[in-house]
Image (spheres, coloured by chain):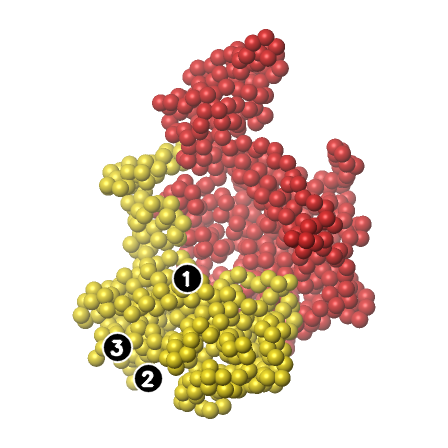
Chain colours: A yellow, B red
Amino acid sequence: MNRLDALRGTTPPKPHDARAIAALAANPGCSRRALMDGAGIDKEALARHLGHPAPFGQSPFAITRGNAFEALVKADGCAELIRMLRELLGLPIDEVAYHDVENVGAHLRHTHTRALIDRAARGEGTGTVYDHPLFTLAIAGHTAYLEPDVVAFQLGGRFHIVEIKSFAVVDGQADPAAVAAAARQAAVYVLALRTLLEELGHDPLRVAHDVVLVCPENFANRPVATLVDVRRQLAVLRRQLARMTSLDRLLAALPEDVTFDLEPDDDGRPARPVAELADAVRATEARYAPECLSTCDLCFFCRDEARQEGASDLLGRDVRDALGGVASVREALALADGSRAPERGQEEIARLLRGAERLRRECLA
Amino acid sequence: MSLLTSLARLRAIERGRAQPIATVRHCHLSARPMVFIPLKLSGEAAAPLAAMLGTDPGEPRLLAVTQPRNRDLRFAWAGELAGALLPYVTGFMGETETVERRNADPYERALDAPQLIVPNRAGVAFTRLLGRSTRFRRTDGPFPVPEGVPLLGRWLTYFAERAAYPGSSLMPAATDELGRHWASGQSALEDANLAALLAWITEGPDDAAEDPLIWPPAGPATDPGFDAEVLAPAMESGSAERITEALRTQLEPTWRLVWRAIGLLRELTPGASVAQRWEHDRASYSGMSAQLAEGAPPQARRDGAVAAAARLARMERAQAAYEVQRAYDDPLVMAEYRLTGEAFAGEVVDTAPDHTEGEGRSRKLRPLVTVKTDDLVRIAPGSALGTPQRRGQGAELVSARDGLVTLKITKGMGRGRTPAPGAVPEVGERVCYSSLTDDFQGAAALPEPEETPWTHGGPPRPYEPTDEDAREEWS
């Protein structure tokens, strides 16, 4: 059995979606996350079993609204979408066709997508908008299946990924965090489609690095399309995925018997002793940062661990940077009150900390 | 984050309590602030769900949209909000003072101004959107909205814009103000949770602060679990009372927290420059009131090039002045500059009050002062210095060596041959000098809007309210 599969054990693998792949790039230095994702671990179930469930949830109102908006954009063979693409990309009016890949049945979707994209790249079936295509991307030797909202194909010979999101663009401005997340996710699709074109022997650069972001405009439900350049997100993603293939090194550093198996019982409920599982997780090195609280299912577990270790990571990267890499709270405080002599290379930060301590005492006396 | 604040955060972890990072209060607190806690419907840009507001901690007023998807109820809610907020917001123009101006007509400035306090920054952002979605409406025509709604929109837009202005206290966010005065033992990201930050300052960190069942989020987003298990069934039942009571459970805890935050801030003595900044707020508020009285159109969707550049320049100047004033008002803030060598404090060990420079008619009084300091001084000779102890005084660094700094006083010591009494510090006095000075910066030279060059899109078309704006969908 492959070592990564052994890490997962008898628990069924959790397929990666674009959101999960995009999140990989959020904290590239975290070995724990790299290993878990590489092995296809269901981190959400793992965190719940460890007693530190993730703080995420989506409101039913948000889900309903998102679905309703997507349905609106795609209604009548993507009529609304095609109208916007025409304006944005200059698609010729009479040559737009709509093709829903989902109609062929799930098991055939990927093969069908390949065939369609191949034909389109050869110049047959031009000017088509493809809905519900299914792409694949190899993540650490595992195949992840990805479902972009739609792929548009332009007559000029370039493919455009379309990403439909339900956050609003008000007077030409949207929440920067939401746009950044959408761009990261769309970059995953661009990469997947480029990989596919390359496999088929076409020029991968025929997939545009500008993705089409479709959002509701102002306070209404009317959609508006904008081009978003995802070159930077693509670069980060490529680097991170290249790193993922070097999981062997991380695996080699792990003790032989470590596994994150939840040992599900006959009903699929995790039955593994929690303490044992926690020990296994602790055998991998995490790089906790407060940003994890919004991206990673394991965040509360890792934060708890950082608290117990008294790590200055808890306070965020800016504090850690200000401390010049002194990693422990106790060590930094001891340097500040002079009860600990600085090690080589710590002289400057120790001097600053002592100065800061003297000033705080003076001002608060 | 500065090293001083980082150290305070480390201490907070060690002691299990937030540590002070200010010795005085740097924001104005109104004697009668209006606490405003808005909630919105998840997944929508600016669909209001409810708001709790009021000036008396014992009497929160709850306004709820009893069927959040209904557009008419949404506008009715906005009308109710206007009824509750506008009398407070506009009521301060009753008592004014006449302010003389150079090169301009005198104007009336309100003696006090409204203060809207929201729980967090997201509350400010939502107020902006609420303002945007209501200010273009009309009370007549094809889609009339209740009386007061367009005016409410303009005021909410104004408050949210003012909140981005450094040093303004017209619309503070509770988490921001607490975070300026205390360093908790958690990250800045986690400080955005009002319950968690307050726990650090008062009883010590508490995991319950992150449990939405104990401390519901301070808005405007609601807890997804609440949406799924309480709000959605209540909406399905169609019972207005059930929805209102459900929303009350989400707002009341935050209401108590915001008032608690106000209480904590009130215990601090205000800094010396707080009144001056509040005066600017009063002037700005009076200007806005005057514009509305003159019938100015609603704020445009976007600034033109000149207006945007002017706004940016104003904000930059306000930011610079705010930083200097905070340092001069508060030794603990000044300590940040002492740590980086841009300021020093110590004891006066020698003075030459009658020292002069130049001969004959150009002879000038330049008293010399020598200060012994433990601070590492990184200020070049010849740099201008200021001092919190004598605000109007100017000085210049002469030399800094071996913990002894000599400076000469260049302005603010009187016009006579000898310095005015008290102008030169005495031997033994503790003083602080800094290269950080609040030099007056002139306004940026910008063309008139109608002369906007073509590189910046040419003269902007003046904003004219359209029927389309007034009818804009709000779904």
Using residue A175 as the reference point, say whether residue A364 is left or right of it: left
Secondary structure, mark 1, is helix
- Looking at the rendered image, the disc whose residue lies closer to the viewer, 3 or 1, is 3
The residue lying toward the viewer, choosing from B31 and A208, is: A208
Q: How far apart are marks 2 and 1 (CA)?
A: 30 Å
Identity, as a three-letter code, of the amino acid under mark 3: Asp
Q: In this view, does B201 lie above or below A219?
A: above
Q: Which residue has dot 3 on it?
A: A5
* Residue with the most extreme bottom position: A104
Q: In the displayed image of the protein, which residue is found farthest to the left?
A: A256
Left or right: B240 as drawn, with respect to B6? right
User: Which of A212 and A296 lies nearest the eye of the viewer?
Assistant: A212
Residue at numbered disc 2: A267
Residue matched to label 1 = A293
Marks 3 and 1 in Cβ contact (< 8 Å): no
Q: Which chain carries label 3?
A: A
Q: In which quarter of the image is the C terminus of chain B?
A: bottom right
Q: Are the residues under marks 3 and 1 on the same chain?
A: yes
- Which secondary structure, mark 2? loop
At horizontal 61% and vertical 16% (from top left) the residue drawn is: B414
Gap in angstroms between the C-alphas marked 3 and 1 = 27 Å
Q: Tell me: residue A283, above or below residue B350.
A: below
Name the residue type under label 1.
Leu
Q: Can you see residue A113? A: no
Element type at mark 3: helix
The chain containing the residue under callout 2 comes to A
User: Would residue A186 be visible to someone looking at this image?
Assistant: yes
Count of labels in the image: 3
Residue under the point 37% across and 57% down: A289
- What is the x, y in percent for residue B372? 40, 21
